[in-house]
Amino acid sequence: MARGPRLDCPGAVHHFRTRGIERRPIFRDDRDRADFLSRLATLSDQLRCPVYAWTLIPNHVHLVLRSGSLGISSFGRRLLGGYAGAFNSRHRRAGYLFQGRFKSTLVDEDTYLLQLVRYVHLNPLRAGLVHTLEDLDQHAWSGHAALVGTRPNDWQETGFVLQQFGNCLPTARQLYREFVATAIASPRPTAVAAEWLHPSKPFGRTSGRRARGREEWTLDERIVGSDDFVARVLADTGSRSTAAEPRLLADQLHDTIADSCAAAQVAVAEVLGSSKRPHLVSVRREICVRAVLQFGLPVSQVAGTLRISARTVLRALDRHRLRSFSGRR
């Protein structure tokens, strides 16, 4: 069956997930995990995408976030594209890292946000990476520890989630932790979590069935929420323009060029010119590496802006990888 178009609704809460190709690890060590989180923190700030929950499992990732003005597609492409390039460089590999495109489910936050946050943060426990709630409280690779206050970080949006449990911070943390604890005894995810992860049955978007005595609600692979919520989302996604995305990518690339030229003490016009002088070629290579591997920008856009061929960009990336490999021997 052909994949439906992604529901890319800025300002909505998304359950974002991706896994390694053939279920292989996408994190081999703590350096990989730290790199992924650094990129996540940077993009969360740059694209105004607050992250409410996250978990890094060796072969997959779960995020709960609110998409910014560019929507979830731009966020996912830049996060995973930049990380995959850096991962391949570090581990001397080539080819795809992730299994197809990432998945995102647009969630009715009024009904499901807290259950989704709990589901995502219980993943390390269910996967056997930790064994008790006390272990989870200290786990470095999940957003749960930031919510209970044992491992605070400055980029995760904890206030919005904790406010759902009250305005007194210590009390809100305690109530959140108790909310998580209530689900630990269950051998499987909560019913509602299972429904949005396996949404094709029994509740299809056109079925109009009633969910276990609750209000009638709508669900498919891309969205979970009431009929009214789905109608609002589809109306918004049908009318939204994505013209801002190319402008932001262009701004990011021009900033990278300006920074690299300033560091090398050369003029931008020289780097964008046709000169083959070695120091200018070196600056162009550095821009290619930063733009593609660090920021996940498209090779074609980097090539067009620098007025070089896509093959030249790819050669710069290959040269960087070979140099990195030689330095580790």
Image: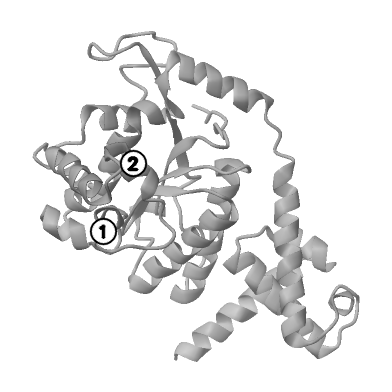
Vertically, is 174 above or below 41?
above
Left or right placement of residue 126 versus residue 78 in this view: left
Tell me how far mark 2 sits from mark 1, CA to CA: 14 Å
Tell me where residue 140 sits by quadrant. Answer: bottom left
Kindly identify the amino acid type of the residue bearing the numbered disc 2.
Gln
Left or right placement of residue 179 versus residue 198 in this view: left
Kindly identify the amino acid type of the residue bearing the numbered disc 1.
Gly
Left or right placement of residue 82 versus residue 251 in this view: left
Q: Residue at x 46, y 29 (%)?
A: 222
Foreground tag (2 vs 1): 2
Q: Residue at x 90, y 81 (%)?
A: 275
Query: Which residue is identified by label 1?
Result: 149
Vertically, is 48 above or below 302?
above
Q: Residue at x 39, y 43 (%)?
A: 160
Q: Nearer the viewer, residue 239 or 76?
A: 239
Q: Secondary structure at mark 1?
A: loop
Mark 2 or 1, nearer chain start:
1
Q: Which mark is residue 10?
A: none
Query: Which residue is identified by label 2?
Result: 163
Quick one: label 1, few (<14), some, or many (20+) residues within 10 Å? some
Q: Nearer the viewer, residue 46 or 283?
A: 46
Q: Position of residue 295 (x, y in %)?
A: 60, 63
Vertically, is 320 above or below 116?
below
